[in-house]
Amino acid sequence: MHGEPALKPGFTHFPYANPKAPKGGALVLADQGSFDSLNPLIIKGAFPAGLRDFVYESLMARSFDEPFTLYGLIASSIDTPDDRSEATFRLDPKARFSDGHPVTAADVVFSWQTLRDKGRPNHRTYYAKVEKVETPDPLTVRFIFKNANDRELPLILGLMPILPKHVFETREFEKASLDIPIGSGPYTVGKVDPGAGITYRRNPDYWGRDLPVNRGRYNFDTVRYEYFRDANSMFEAFKKGLYDLREETNSGRWASSYDFPALKAGKVKKSIVPVGTPAGFAAFAFNTRREIFADIRVRKALSLMFDFTWVNKHLFHGLFKRTQSVFDRSSLSSHGVKASEYERKLLAPFPDAVLPGIMDGTFSLPRHDGSGRDRKQQRAAIKLLRGAGYKLQNGVMVGGASGKALEFEILCATRAQERLALNFSGSLKRIGVTARVRLVDSAQYQRRRQTFDFDLVQTLWLSSLSPGNEQAFRWGSAAAGQEGSFNYAGVKSPAADAMIKAMLAATSRKDFTDAVRALDRVLLSGYYTIPLYHQSGQWLAWWKKITGPDVIPLYGNRTDLWWYRGDEPG
């Protein structure tokens, strides 16, 4: 998207993959929750982990060392003019679905039409930007765009999952189903235990096994995902060797529970893996569609009451860092960085969109005294609420005109979320605000989040070094009223819309970075969320019968790079 690819034509494998990795063995992984569908491309139902990556393929493949670079997969080449008004993909004639049918231009067009009309909301949004599609021959597809200069759109189409037309044209695509899917990827679906587990089997006839983008990847004969209802039972299963690799996210377990017999005996290893990408934006999201959160002063006041200092020390063993940016832990973060001239130019039409301290890089989220009852922050929060028309009456914060108590619900999906929410609720009680904590199962949580049926929700937006059109789906005004979008907070900001547009139109990495930072400043200034915390790297533990490459990609650990080593020493 910007500049030239790092790998030249004729490269043999990605730098982080081991082309000599042996094939064979079994990998067992774990996930929490359940699933009731084998269609990962629709909003209905919950689908199992691994399905999109192992079974379906795209026209192009990501490099996990290069944020804005794709290499050939189903498509052996792509051509785009300088104005990005169209993109032409030439398909590899060897490409096959797992049932032996060749992948043709007709499958690509069918996939585009189906996902545009019936797919997930983000797919519908992206693929609707295509004006028309041409197929000069059975192996060539040309997408002509409604508007030029969207530099990311060719990449988005390059990552579009390709469906077999001969299979899906006879199925009801929009219905959650356990019908076995057919794709062109390295694995096929084997045993399925609905809601409990799924096994993927490496396809011995996989057409793309010798492509440079695949060498050293997809090494296990089978990959099995076992499902667990709660985090504790999932960890206990790992200790017993019931699955092979886990990424730990619970600081308490990482600090004190990785001392079980198998680890002490050297059968299990653990490591902190460095990651060069944004940490992911974990936050409490205010549903600003609710009248109670329409006033920024209310949102700011409640934000002041989140005591990260106490939480990190007493709940998380001091292992987390406070998240200060939507793109924290990366060069895209605006935190501590003075706005550039170009940023100020972009933001000039919106003089009130960014707070002065955020514009000049001096702002940080409040640091509490660690007592759990910081009176300075309490006084500041109460002052803001009074300015918004509230008053303390018999220890209860009420609306000055209505007399209605300031109260709302915090929606949670896990015990860990519940624990944090209860702590926050206790802090809010000190200023007369009632926050009820509601723990629901994963299916209800997903459903309520997708339909914006919540007041405050703890959620996570995954981030990368190549943010693009998905930012409109997270923060754009059009997405605020679109159920199934990731704009949980209901952000409707002309400034945010303009920064996203500038980001997508950027022709250099510098202009792109400045536009992303400007968006970051707008979102932080709006107090649409309460940023939480993040890890400095990935906390990994694995049984020694498997191993991974010595070189870690910029994006961190990838399980598709591991292989089976059995009882080898070392």
Image: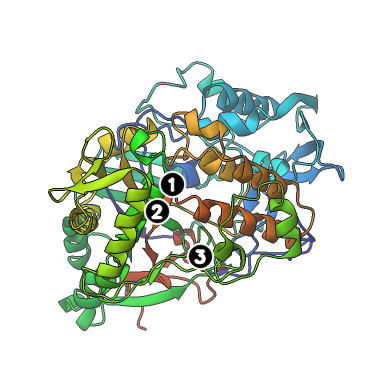
Residue nearest the viewer, comparing 516 with 82: 516
Identify which residue is drawn at 41% across, 38% down. 294
Label 2 sits on what residue type?
Lys
Q: Is residue 21 left or right of residue 458?
A: right
Q: Which residue is mark 1?
A: 296
Q: Please report contact status of discs 1 and 2: CB closer than 8 Å, yes or no.
A: yes
Q: Which residue is mark 2?
A: 300
Q: Which residue is mark 3?
A: 328
* Mark closest to the chain's N terminus, 3 or 2: 2
For the C terminus, the image quarter is bottom left
Residue 167: image location, x then y, percent: 52, 23
- Density class for disc 1 (Cα within 10 Å; few <14, some 14-19, many ≥20) is some
SS for dot 2: helix
In front of the other: 304 or 311: 304
Q: Which amino acid, mark 1?
A: Ile
Q: Is residue 109 above or below residue 228?
A: above
Per the model, the C-alpha gap separating discs 1 and 3 is 23 Å
Give residue 27's quadrant in the image. Answer: bottom left
- Residue sitting at x 61%, y 68%: 360
Mark before the other along the chain sequence, 1 or 3: 1
